[in-house]
Amino acid sequence: MIDPTQVLIFWAWVCYVMALSAQRQEMFNLKVDHHDGRTMRLWLALAASVIVGGLVGFWLAYLYVSAVGVLPALALVIGGSLLAGLFAGGLYVWVGVSLVSRTGFIVWPVAAACVYWLIHRLPVPPA
C-alpha cells in the first residue's frame, strides 16, 4: 500500500516542476531590450530562480533517494515531471505562461519546502 505522505510528495513535486518549468520557458522566450532595464532585471531574476530551483531539485531528489531508494525516486522524478508537463500545457493555455511564471517565484519555494518537510515525515523502513 502506498503511504499517503508519498502521494503528497508526488503532488508537491508536480507543483514544483510546473512552476520552475514555466519560469524556464518564460526566461528563454523573453525578448530582452538592452535599453530597458526592466526586462533585463526580469530575465536575471528568472535565470537566478531557475538555477537555484534546479539545484534545489537535485538536492531534494538526493534526499528522496536516501529516504526511499532509487526506484521510487525515479518514479517520482520521471512520473511527476511528465504529469507536470501535461498539466502545465493546459495551465499555460488557460492563464498564460507569464502569470504561471510570475507566481512561480512563490510556488516553487513553497512546493520545495513541502517536499523537504514531507520527506522527513516518511516512515523509517525496518532494518
Image: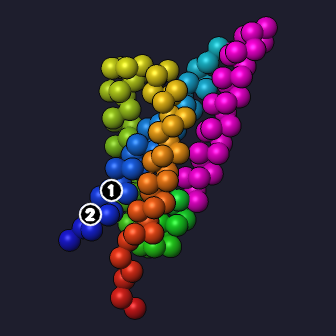
Q: Amino acid at mark 2?
A: Pro
Count neighbours of disc 2 (C-alpha within 10 A) and say few if under 14, some if 14 to 19, many if 20 or more. few
Q: Is residue 34 magenta?
A: yes
**Predominant SS of the magenta segment:** helix
Q: Which residues are magenta?
A: 32-59
Q: Quadrant of residue 18?
A: top left
Which circle marks residue 8 in the picture? 1
Q: Tell me residue 95's x, y (percent).
A: 37, 20
Q: Is residue 21 visible?
A: no
Badge 1 vs badge 2, beta-carbon distance below 8 Å? yes
Query: Mark 2 = which residue?
Result: 4
In-image side of 117 versus 87 (left or right): right
Q: Residue at x 71, y 28 (%)?
A: 44
Q: Residue at x 66, y 23 (%)?
A: 42
Taking the view exactly as shown, the residue that stands out farthest to the bottom is: 127
Which circle marks residue 47 in the picture? none
Vertical relation: 93 (above or below) 36: below
